[in-house]
Amino acid sequence: MTIAAAPPPSRARAVRVWLLLVAGLIGVMVLVGGATRLTESGLSIVEWKPVTGTLPPLSEAQWRAAFDGYKQIPQYRELNAGMTLDQFKTIFWWEWSHRLLGRVIGIVYLLPFLWFLWRGAIGPRWTRALWIVFGLGALQGAVGWWMVASGLSQRTEVSQVRLAIHLTLALIIYAAIVWTVCRMTDRVRVAAPLRLKATALVLLGLTFVQLFAGALVAGLRAGRLYNTWPEIDGALIPDAARLWFETPWWKNLFDNHLTVQFDHRMLAYALWALAALHMIDALRTRAGAAARGAVLLFLALTAQAVLGILTVLYAAPIDLALAHQAMALVVLTLTVLQAERLTATSDHQTALDRAAAERLPPKPVLSA
């Protein structure tokens, strides 16, 4: 056995800054992915080449070959027949940028991670967690191609279910990183009643369900239909025969444009109402930082609701749709922060965090 000093404060801060950078890049990638979807660009690259696909076409012949590949899929034949090469380049650059950003995130995550491991800046507990995050990132690349493949033969667009899984997995990775950074940070823990902790966790879970539902709306382009509010299809609650005409019944939850948009609206109302109750409870119990977090979360959800209504009323123009997606990231971030803040205890402080306190010298840690 050897004795190794715990990481110095500067190295602990470097780990957190690195993880925040990765989270920021994932947030940018989510928005670029949204723009790729809204511009119908996701099927412009019909091959998955993780290494050689890093470079775009560099000659006229290569551009022609890429365009010829796109001409073989149903989207071109049924929706974009007659598209010019210059028009193809526009959608190609969106999809290429999205894939390139995924590769950049992988490099920005893995290389510093290996360096921090080599320097002993990350303890065993966080090492396991961060390897899991890396594994989810690798899975995300495969899920992305699985999504694209769904639109290359029988459809003119990707499967909305696969799109929703792809987006949700990206947001799970994002949330896991934000949560991990919070747990690595030495700060005053919040004492709060159990019901406040429970509602924070329910809010987090419901937020993920809502994000999945929103991705289904985007995948079906359902936001360009039923562009009235508060009524939808002429009523506050549409006729059951129109909500459930698909068989088996559960297909309506994923394929029926009216049902998918109605579910998204109902989930939004439920999320907003629960956030309001959570805020009132936090303020009444004077939960300190948790009360401030609850207020911020409620305000963000209110802004998100306004953006959602405007997006519906104006039939999902790209600027409003992207603003709605960006605010969804803000809501998710605040929900993660609130749930982590209320469920954290002093037990979550690590040697890495304690060594970061400037008034204390680093404590020795046994390592094999």
Image (tube, helix red, strand yellow):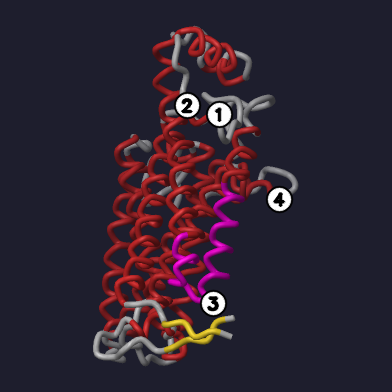
Image quarter hosting the N terminus:
bottom right
Disc 2 from disc 1: Cα separation? 6 Å
Looking at the rendered structure, the kind of residue marked 3 is: Arg
Location of residue 314 in the rendering, given as x and y in whole percent from the top left corner: 32, 37
147 sits to left or right of 357: right
Say which of 155 and 25 sits in front: 25
Disc 2 from disc 4: Cα separation? 45 Å
Say which of 333 and 279 sits in front: 333
Mark 1–mark 4 CB contact (< 8 Å) = no
Mark 2–mark 4 CB contact (< 8 Å) = no
Element assignment for label 3:
helix
Tag of residue 249: 4
Identify the residue under disc 3: 125
Looking at the rendered structure, the kind of residue marked 1 is: Thr
**Region of the chain picked out in magenta, as a range:** 115-140
Tag of residue 52: 1
Element assignment for label 1:
helix
Marked residue nearer the N-terminal end (1 or 4): 1
Mark 3–mark 2 CB contact (< 8 Å) = no
| Magenta region includes residue 123 | yes
- Label the magenta part by its dominant secondary structure: helix
Say which of 319 and 242 sits in front: 319
